Amino acid sequence: MPRRTLRLAGEPAADRLLTRDPLALVIGMVLDQQVPLDWAFRGPASMVERLDLAVPMDAAHIARIDPDVLADAFARPPSLHRYPRSMAERVQALASLVAEEYGNDASRIWTDAVDGAALRARVRSLPGFGDQKARIFVALLGKQLGIRPAGWQEACEPFGEPGSYRSVADIVDEQSLGEVRRRKKEAKEAAKAARTAASSSR
């Protein structure tokens, strides 16, 4: 699957899991919400350790885990997310969908997609994915893992642009991580200034 080892979790073992295990990567992307991205992408490795999961991760098995057991594993300090119980529910819903609709093989989300638009639609339908996150994930697959069905760049605009440093799709080392964080901060500040200007002009 991979063209390069991902550098998202900031821990070698966690990054190797993300690189080699499609389900781990999708789970990490689900967790990448309202927490620092390295915290989110360490989540799958922490799940493996806390729940004694086999690698590669088995979606059907995760779907069968007692929800309270899964939630407790997410909530145990240090928690896997700022909202551990709700995110445990979301991850379990994702695992159920992968088991039922993709034959327990998360890689089929992209290997079975006929083109970029279909890939984005498949990702968009997963629990925890909105339109922007789906575009970012398609960009991550294309830029770093070489998964490039026809029209993939158009399907993930504007995140597929080379060297754009707009998202996790562009993070390959500490320098690019810093650049992505800088540009995200600038975008948030610009959006805040625009909202302030709009409200003051009313």
Image (spheres, rainbow, N blue to C red):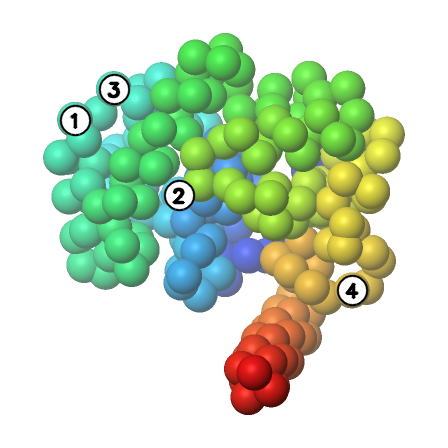
Q: Where is mark 1, residue-wise?
A: 66
- Identify which residue, 201 or 160, lies in the foreground: 201
Crowd rating for badge 3 (residues with CA inside 10 Å; few <14, some 14–19, many 20+): few
The Cα atoms of the two marked residues, 3 and 1, are separated by: 6 Å
Determine the secondary structure under disc 2: helix
Write down the quadrant of residue 99 in the picture.
Answer: top left
Q: CA distance from mark 2 to mark 4?
A: 27 Å
36 or 123: which is nearer to us?
123
Nearer the N terminus, badge 2 or badge 4? 2
Which amino acid type corresponds to the residue marked 1 in the rendered image?
Asp
In the image, what residue occupies the spot 60% across and 80% down? Answer: 198
Q: Quadrant of the C terminus?
A: bottom right
Q: Secondary structure at mark 1?
A: loop
- Answer yes or no: is residue 58 visible: no
Mark 2 vs 1, N-terminal side? 2
User: Distance of mark 2 from mark 1, alpha carbons?
Assistant: 17 Å
User: What amino acid is at disc 3?
Assistant: Arg
Q: Residues within 10 Å of mark 2 (few under 14, many from 20)?
A: many
The residue sitting at the front extreme is 202
Rendered image: mark on residue 164: 4
Amino acid carrying label 4: it is Ser
- Does 116 sit above or below residue 86? above
Which mark's residue is nearer the viewer, 2 or 3?
A: 3
Q: Which mark is residue 64?
A: 3
Contact (Cβ within 8 Å) of mark 2 with mark 4: no
Q: CA distance from mark 4 to mark 3?
A: 40 Å
Decide: is 159 above or below 195: above
- Which marked residue is nearer to the observer: mark 2 or mark 1? 1
> At x 19% / y 51%, what residue is drawn?
75
The numbered disc on residue 44 is: 2
The amino acid type of the residue labelled 2 equals Pro
Mark 2 vs mark 3: which is more N-terminal? 2
